[in-house]
Image: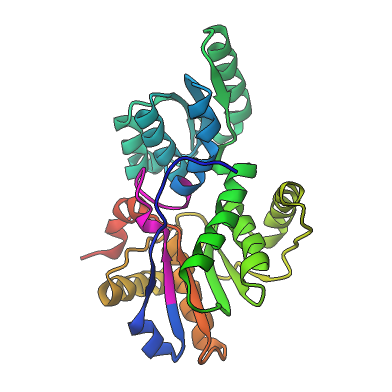
Amino acid sequence: MEHLDFTPTPLIELPYYSSKWGCNVMAKRDDLFAQAGGGSKARMLQYILYPLVHNNTEVLVTAGGPCSNYNRAAALLCAHYGIKLELISYTDEPKEWESINHKIVKLAGAHLTFCQKNNVPSTIAQVVEDVSKSGKRFSHLYGGGRQLEGFFAYYDAVKELKEQSPIDFDEVFVACGTGTTLTGICAGMHSFFPKAIVHAISNARLWDAEKSIVEDDMKILNDYLGTSYVFSNMRFHEEFLAGGYAKTCDAELSTIRECISKTGMLIDPTYSGKAFWGMSEIISKENLKNKNILFWNTGGQMNLMTQINEFGN
């Protein structure tokens, strides 16, 4: 599958945690992805936007909440490639409009249509109808990167990791929101690191709600790859929700402080910090001595800045 040009993200050692836990801990730094503010959504959009750029698409219609990393990355990349972004932005939580991601979306010149969550489908339909009447070449994409190109981006990312890594990983820890990143990583691990266990640290959903979604996503990716992968290499963790999406707790905040102060790697309370907290708890409780551990940092620096007051003084 073709994609826009980008450079691989670093794979680094985390010696502080290797010493602390008695295992070999490394991090795949997608937080340092070089475009659109970094993170997993910026990587996905290199694949998602490729056909739009090469087909001279004039308008992209998509949707997401004001905290969305996808919205921010899409807005910046659309600005770069000269595509007008028609964004349906929705929330039932007024404080989310203070998100740094939302402010960047506005700075990038996206045209915003606001609605509440229960009005999203009808609002999208109206915006699509209005854009189609304009006669401009447009594309409507599902929010969050949940499509084949998004899944494949992280299958391909695991291939990138394989080319970088001198070792095989035993345990992989990653944040899980919509499940798009998780689907690609689990499929990629089957192909390139078949002994690895993927720990999906949920930041929003219970497994009962997530299961059918990621299974449908894996079927789409399997059909493309000609494979029959399932989530047999994955453990789903819902015990670190801390109250739900963008919610946090003292234990998570303490973990984030330690990580940033001991490694210089930024993680946030909504996504990557929740995954790092989950990893810390799991490694502390389970016998993972001498194992090769990978933390996949999917980004979230904008959310860290948005939630910086959670840390007090």
Q: Position of residue 182 (x, y in %)?
A: 60, 59
Q: Residue sitting at 55 percent across and 31 percent down?
A: 51
Q: Position of residue 221 (x, y in %)?
A: 70, 50
Magenta stretch contains residue 40: yes
> Measured along the vertical axis of the image, is residue 106 above or below residue 190?
above
Question: From which residue to which does the magenta span run?
Answer: 26-41
Q: Position of residue 270 (x, y in %)?
A: 44, 57
Q: Quadrant of residue 101?
A: top left
Residue sticking out furthest to the right: 228
> Measured along the vertical axis of the image, is residue 290 above or below residue 207?
below
> Measured along the vertical axis of the image, is residue 25 above or below residue 127?
below
Quick one: quadrant of the C terminus?
bottom left
User: How many numbered circles does the render carry?
Assistant: 0
Q: Position of residue 46 (x, y in %)?
A: 48, 42
Residue 213 visible in the current orientation = yes
Q: Nearer the viewer, residue 123 or 49?
A: 49
| Colour treatment of the image | rainbow
> Measured along the vertical axis of the image, is residue 65 above or below residue 267?
above
